Amino acid sequence: MDHDPSHVPPALTALDQQVELVVRRTVDTLWQQLDDGVLDAPHAALAQAHHELAEAEIAVTFYRVRLADMVSGVLPVDANLLEAIDRTADSLESAMIDRDNKQQAVADALRPIEAAHFDKPVSSADFVALQAIGQGADLRQDLRTGLRAVSSASLWISYAHLLSLEAAGFVQRDTSRPLYVSQPLSLTDAGRAVLTSSRPVGKRHSRSPAPAYGAFPYRRAVGSGLRRNH
């Protein structure tokens, strides 16, 4: 009657909705950005804590389901079953305590991000970039140089700037397509809310003209924080 906890389907946690509200992206996206190494320290700590909470939730679900199987009436009631029920109940209690501790760790990791994010003004550069992405943009990688940049109808956006917008939860990309084909970008709900409710702060930057269709901004990219893909 042994089961592998890894076979239990991933469980939702009690804090998923709160995490997504604060970081303005899905938890799946947050985990992917942790793997990609594009998160700042507070968001990386939150993503790691949430990942550990999800694993703890899976353990709780596993032992809860196992206990339910034991008392379902299918198995014969004997001393072996009672011992197995006691062991599983103890394991469930331990998993529950661990889950509660992990849940508190996520709540603690949320606090500084929540305090920093709400009512935080958006820079003029970010505002203009979000406007351009909202009108249609994609991320491309040049096969010869390995450089990446965002192409839109109105201006180009450096890859470093895109990463900052993604880390803020304003932009998402379609990673189902390879970079050499181009990955379409779109605004998240938080990104659209910025355009409708926020006032940009700081000096407005002049727009960099978009390169001609089919051209990759090699020279512009070199001085704009783009990284070479190794």
Image (cartoon, rainbow, N blue to C red):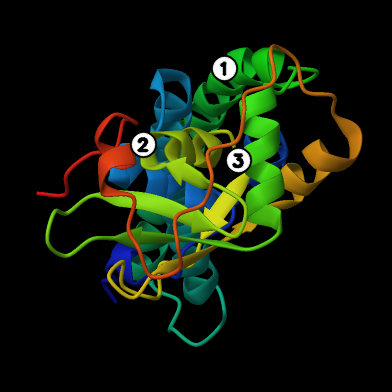
Is residue 89 visible in the rendered image? The answer is no
Residue positioned most to the right: 197
In this view, 127 is above or below 77? above
Tell me if 8 is positioned left or right of 99 in this view: left
Q: Quadrant of residue 227?
A: top left
In this view, 120 is above or below 96? above
Disc assigned to residue 38: 2
In this view, 144 is above or below 201? below
Q: CA distance from mark 3 to mark 1?
A: 20 Å
Q: Quadrant of the N terminus?
A: bottom left
**Marked residue nearer the N-terminal end (3 or 1):** 1
Q: Say if mark 1 contacts mark 2, CB within 8 Å.
A: no
- Callout 1: helix, strand or loop? helix
**Marked residue nearer the N-terminal end (3 or 2):** 2
Residue kind at label 1, given as amino acid type: Asp
Q: Position of residue 62 (x, y in %)?
A: 43, 62
Residue kind at label 3, given as amino acid type: Gly
In this view, 181 is above or below 222? below
Residue marked by disc 3: 169
Nearest to viewer (mark 1 / mark 2): 2
- Callout 2: helix, strand or loop? loop
Tell me the crowding category of disc 2: few under 14, some 14 to 19, or many 20 or more residues within 10 angstroms, Cα based.
some
Is residue 211 visible in the rendered image? The answer is yes
- Front-most of residues 41 and 90: 41
Residue lying at 30% horizontally and 64% vertically, measured from the top left: 6
Residue marked by disc 1: 108
Q: Say if mark 3 contacts mark 1, CB within 8 Å.
A: no
Residue positioned most to the bottom: 74
Residue kind at label 2, given as amino acid type: Val
- Front-most of residues 176 and 66: 176
